[in-house]
Image: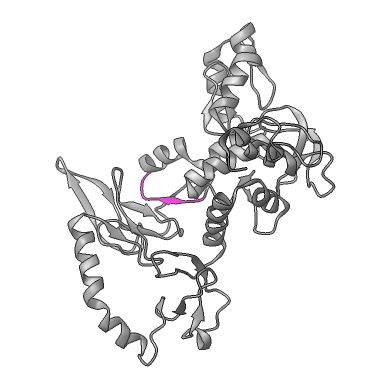
Amino acid sequence: LRVKPQRACPKNPARSCPHCHEHFASRAAALVHAVFCHKNPKSPAEGVTCAACCEEGQCIRFPCRAHHYCSDCLFEQIKVGLADRSRFPLRCCGREVEAGDPVDLAVAQMLSESSKEKYQQAMLLKVSSKVMYCPQIACGALIALDHIASSQASGPHGCPKCQQALCFTCKSEWHAGMTCGHYQFMSAQNKDAITKLCRQMNWMRCFECGHVVEKSAGCNHITCVCGNQFCYVCGKTWGTCACQIISAGHALRHNRAPEVGTQHICQWCRRPYPSEEELEVHIRVCRVRLDREGGEFECPACFSRFLTFDLMRRHRKDKCEAAKYGVFRCGLCKVTFENKAILKTHRRVCTQELTC
C-alpha cells in the first residue's frame, strides 16, 4: 500500500489481527495484539491478571514464575529498554529473561525489523563476553566472538550482515599478507587522527568494544552499551585507576576501589560503594529495587509504584483509594493506616512482595 489514503484506511489488512480480525489504530498495535491473541495457536499467553496494570487479559509469564504481564505493559517495558539499554535483559523479581526464553521470543515477534535488530543487539551484548563491530561504516553489525576458537580467530571471516572479510584477532577488516601488528602499525596514522579528534572534543573511547562516549553530566563512572565499566578520565577499567576530580576544594568522586571489607554493598543489586553516603544516594535510584517494588513511577497519594507514567496516572484516576476515599492502605501487605505520613514511612520498609 503505497498511497497514503490506503495506508490510513481503518480497513487496512495490516492494521487487523490475522487471528481474530479485530481492527486497531496502527499496524504496531495490531502486531502486538496478534502475538498475545487468544485465537493464536502459537501464542505463549494465558488468560490471567497482569501484575502491572491489574487487568484481566492475555498475559505472558516471566521467568520468576510468579508474575504475568499483558502485551501493553510488556511493550512499555520494551520501549523503555530500547531507550536505555541497561534495562535489558527484561527482569522480574531479580530473574532475568534469557535469550530463547518464551518472553524473549514473544518480544522479537512484537517489534518492527529495525526495533527487533536493536533489541537483539542489546541481548547479544548482555550474553556475550567477547564482541566486535563490523568496521564498515555502512554496516556496523554487532558480532559475538565467544564461539570462535583462538586458533581460528585470524580468519578471514565474513561479516554476517555485509559479508566483509574480517580478522577476529585484532577486530578489524581482513589484512591479507600482513600480520595483525603490521596492519595496526600501517593504519595507526588514520587512527591517530580519530584519537586526536576525540581528545579535542573531550570524548572517551571504550577499549572493550570501541564505542566513543561523550559525557554531558554526572560522575566519571561510565557504563558502555556493551556493559563494560570504565573511568571517563583515563579510560581504564572502573576501580583500577587512581583518578580523582577536585572542585571547590574537595573530591567530587573517587575512582579507587576500596579494600575488601570496607565496601558498602547494596542489598538489592549487590554493587559495592566506597562510602555509606554514596550507597544511600544509589539506593534511592537503584533500578533493581524499583523494579521489584513495581516500577519507577510512584503514586503521590498511596505510594504504589508502576512501570510507566500512564499506568500510574490511570491508577490515580480510577483505582487509588487514598485519592478517592482517603483510605491509606499499603498495596503490598494490604494493611490500612491512619494517615498518609504513617503509610509513607511503612512503605519504605515493607517487603511483603519483595521476597518472591
Residue drawn 56% across the image and 20% down it: 313
Quarter of the rendering containing residue 249: top left
Q: How many labels does the image show?
A: 0
Compared across the picture, whether 76 is left or right of 150 comes to right
Q: Seen in the image, is 259 located left or right of residue 348? A: left
Q: Pick the quarter of the image with the C terminus.
A: top right
Rendering colour mode: one colour
Quadrant position of the N terminus in the picture: top right
The image shows residue 258 at horizontal and vertical percentages of: 35, 57
Q: Give the answer, above or below, for where 242 lies relative to 270.
A: below
Q: Can residue 130 be seen in this view?
A: yes
Magenta residue span: 270-275
Residue at figure coordinates x 51%, y 88% from the top left: 151
In the figure, 45 relative to 53: above or below?
below
Residue 340, horizontal then vertical, whole percent: 55, 13
Near-viewer residue (207 or 64): 207
- The reply to whether residue 354 is visible in this rendering is no
Is 109 a magenta residue? no
Using the rendered view, name the quadrant where residue 278 is placed.
top left
**As drawn, is 186 to the left or to the right of 44?**
left
Depth check: 29 or 42 in front? 29
Residue 274 in magenta?
Answer: yes
Residue 78 pos. (x, y %): 58, 43
Q: Residue at x 54, y 66 (%)?
A: 128
Of 73 and 35, nearer the camera is 35
Which SS type dominates the magenta stretch?
loop
